[in-house]
Image (spheres, rainbow, N blue to C red):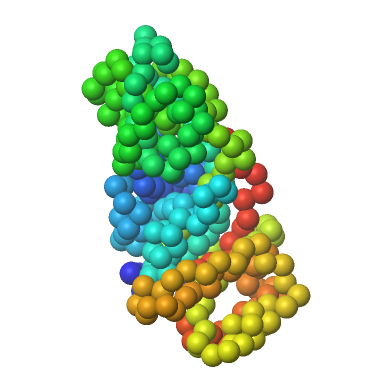
Amino acid sequence: MTDAASPPSSPVTAGPVTVAYQGNPGAYGEIAALNAAPGTSALTQGYPTFHEVLEAVSSGECELGVVPVENSLMGAILQSVDLLLETELHVVREVTVRVSHAMMAVPGVRLSDVKRVYSQQPALDQCTSFLRRHHLTPVTAHDTAGSAKDLAARGSLDEGVIASARAAELYGLEILERGVEDEPFNFTRFMVLSRHEPLPSRETHKTSVVFAVRHTPGFLLETLAQLRGLNLSKIESRPRKDRAWSYLIYIDIEGSAHDPQVALALAGVLRKASFAKIIGSYPVALEAIES
């Protein structure tokens, strides 16, 4: 998928950067895309699937792409993790978006008028207390902002949508209540992907690696021992798609792959593992983007 003629480092661009995301304008992915390239303006382009986002970047149709990899309440977004194993794109940074859901409807509709609420299933799951309190029937839709767009087109007076406040603004809907999520600490972490390797920087870094080991007693422990002395911010097992009852280990390490201690540890993991891939070594999102 990688263009062999591409230079090894990020090009210097003048003007807006095109950024691909999954969903419609107003999606949390679009909010991440708008903030994917600090110091430059972004022209965002939505695609129906995560796979099409990666294809748009790989083909050069877009310069960058964003995919969600983890939600602070619901864990890893496995579809994205699987795609990151298959792509040759480079992770150049991460963006964290504060997920704040809003309940919205056609202008003039009151909350007491609403019977059904549309949104993506994870968003509905994150707002169960609100839905139950107001006796609302949840209806699963493909995405949050798409639900808002569809409701604006239908003009239904007994339906509502849970989405970002930006979606309400874009599609002319009225916000009936803000912050309807059950938990206030709701964040989604996005990875920013490029065809080009990231330029060196002094920013705080994180390194993500996925590996598998032989099904031999003690071998996983021996492999993890290569990371002794490093701070691991995440460790998670994931079933392999090509082998039953075999697992991949996903690890986030605090530090850059260019740091001598991290580089030495990664070399040890690569020697031990039967399969290993460094997903990326990239600047950490120190602050969350408000949605």
Quarter of the view holding residue 15: top left
x and y, in percent, of residue 12 in the image: 50, 56
Spot the residue most to the top: 108
Q: Name the residue rendered at 49%, 24% in the picture.
A: 133
> In percent of the image, x 49 and y 44: which residue is there?
32
Q: How many marks?
A: 0
- Identify the residue at image location x=56%, y=44%: 187
Quarter of the image for residue 106 reads top left
* Residue toward you, 49 or 9: 49
Above or below residue 109? Residue 257 is below
Q: Residue at x 53, y 60 (%)?
A: 92
Is 140 left or right of 217, judged from the image as shown?
A: left
Q: Position of residue 23 (x, y in %)?
A: 35, 42
Quadrant housing the N terminus: bottom left
70 or 127, nearer to the observer: 127
Q: Is residue 287 visible?
A: yes
Question: Taking 93 as reference, is 45 left or right?
Answer: left
Residue at the left extreme of this rendering:
154
Is 257 in front, or is 209?
209
**Does 74 sit above or below residue 174?**
below
Residue 45 seen in the current view = no
Classify residue 193 as left or right of residue 200: left
Height in image: 88 above or below 155?
A: below
| Residue 287 position (above or below residue 77) | above
